[in-house]
Image (cartoon, grey):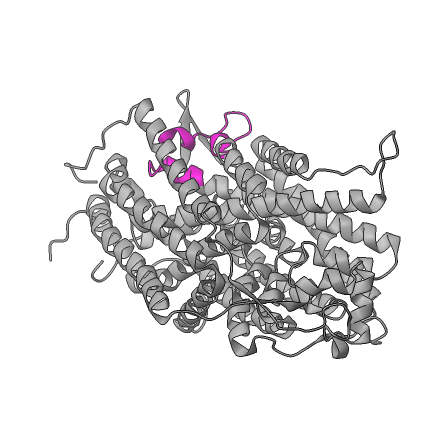
Amino acid sequence: MSQTTTIHGEKISLLRVLGPGHVWALGVGIVLVGEYMGWNFSVGKGGAIAALIACWVAGLLYTCVAMIDSEVTSTVAAAGGQYAQAKHIVGPLMAFNVGLFLVFAYTMLEAANAITLGYLVQTVGGMAGMTDAAGEALVLHDKPFIVLTIMFLAWLNYRGVYATLTFNLVITAIAFIAIIILFFAVKPWTGEVLKHNELLTGLPYDWIGVIAALHFGLWYYLGIEGTCQAAEEVRSPARSLPLGTMTGIMTLLIAATMTWYICAGLMPWEYLGQAVTPLFDAARFMDSMPLMVLLFIGTIFSTLASANGCINDASRAWFSMARDRYLPQWFGAVHPKYRTPYRAIVFLVPVAVLFAYYAPLDQVITFSILSGLLGYTFMTFNVIMFRRKWPLGTIQRGYVHPMHPLPALVLLVLCGATYFAVFLGYGTQLMAMMLFFFIASLWFHFHRYRYVRRGDQFSMPWPRPQGDY
Amino acid sequence: MSNGDYIPPRQSALGQFFDSVFLLALVFAALFAPIYLGLAGGGKTELAIADKTTWTGLGQNPVMQAAWEKLGYTPETAAPLIVSRFDYSFDLIALGVTALVVIGYFLLVVAFSKSEYREVIAERFGRKTD
């Protein structure tokens, strides 16, 4: 299926140019930044050991997400990912909500990346000891770097998806290699550098801290499901999407464990729990300028790759909703030359800039995590409805995930635990988000839906769904 | 598709503009309101520590002390980080209300979606006759 937009009487569609490497880069590229910043807030919420448990529990949650998503996305291969799934399986209002989850999760993640990049440039500027002509210490301001980052990446996305994701593939690989080099530099087999025995202090909050740590534990992996956003631009979705997503989750599990091992063996948990750039701080412990430069570059590249992927994904979700008239149609245009959803890209720039400029990092991350969490909750009943409406053998699936419905049930339980983790300390944001989605849902059902063509919402070449829908 | 399909009205440019502004306003209200009303973020408490001026008083062993110093901290500057703790005490009623809101939200969305989905399937495949 290739959906199109008509410009000057000519049908224009998104280009199918991406392979499994690009899918891996899109998923890991968005998420790898989670090892460079943000994950460590889980140390603050429960201590270092709680953060490791949260890392693995969140890994289980995301394995369920990747399994479920690979099956549904390799079958519903359309731009917008989970949005297109919801449209075909649950219904238009659910799709509208899922589209908003995606836009929020990615736009807030993009803002968090820009904040981190600005902070790092400011920190390194301070460490370099730059002075003005009068010999006064120069303070680099982070705000211009925040705005420039978002603007530059939006421009790159505006120009074309192939160049954008090829750029992501290269800088994601460099950021991943930087973590591996640091891991070997701390010589984990000797115990000379890492001092886990002296630095690990048990569970300072007891077991409730482990649950609370799940909140930021999601940050290790948040966004991996973004692999399916570009489904309409992938050459062979049935092969590339499961392959890219599953190798992506494995990459992240390895990177997350190495990151925790390095940082927990170098820094007291009270510091680690509030650090903005923990891996760069770890490199500072090594007294090695090349390592510091490498981790500086790794942090910058991971934030750029993530923000880049986020702009790609958020704009495609927004574009898909506009194309279906869930949002004003004006946003559903494809650029006549670059074949990108350029109006959606440009529209979301000020939203990301405003949040990056005015909101604190942990709040921005919490909004992103909450949006992701709502999306994962949707996936649980979505896949059960998918199997009921189109049992195995009734339509061609690119991939069939094993042990159904166990992954969905495990995911539901873990989502419930994570809601409780967010409630512990960030309950107000949770309620504010729910209020927003309530109002937005009523607005859609009673106002916006009248502009939507009913039959057009089902575009897959499938038979009529079975059972009572 | 069968005849009698729903034909949606054409939305004016002004209408599209108002819808966009409404959504943007709603987004900013939901996301910025908790921050500007000071309701965002976790509640914090402090550990009762008598001596906040020495590493020993703060409960830091020699390895921890060396790490703090490497990061540029003194006992005085590290103390606020070391004694700060999240307050995880909570009200069961608040937890129950939050759970009801989350569950209620999903039930509402699925129920409304179901009625919309029936229209979609009816147009795409025709009305069920059995």
**Magenta residues, start to end:** A318-344
From the top left corner, tell me how far across and down residue A324 is, in percent. Answer: 34, 38
The answer to if A331 sits in the magenta stretch is: yes
Q: In the displayed image of the protein, which residue is found farthest to the left?
A: B130
Q: Count the numbered circles shown.
A: 0
Left or right: B80 with respect to A410? right
From the top left corner, tell me how far across and down residue A416 is, in percent. Answer: 41, 68
Q: Nearer the viewer, residue A6 or B106?
A: B106
Quarter of the picture holding the C terminus of chain A: bottom left
Quarter of the picture holding the N terminus of chain A: top left
Which quadrant would residue B108 be assigned to in this image?
A: bottom left
A69 up-or-down from A110: above or below: below
From the top left corner, tell me how far across and down residue A419 is, in percent. Answer: 43, 64
From the top left corner, tell me how far across and down residue A159 is, in percent. Answer: 59, 31
Left or right: A322 with respect to B40? left
Which quadrant would residue A146 be assigned to in this image?
A: top right
Which quadrant would residue A332 be assigned to in this image?
A: top left
Q: Is residue A177 visible?
A: no
Q: Nearer the viewer, residue A90 or A98?
A: A98
The answer to if A407 sits in the magenta stretch is: no
Left or right: B27 with respect to A468? right
Residue in view at x 20 percent, y 46 percent: B119
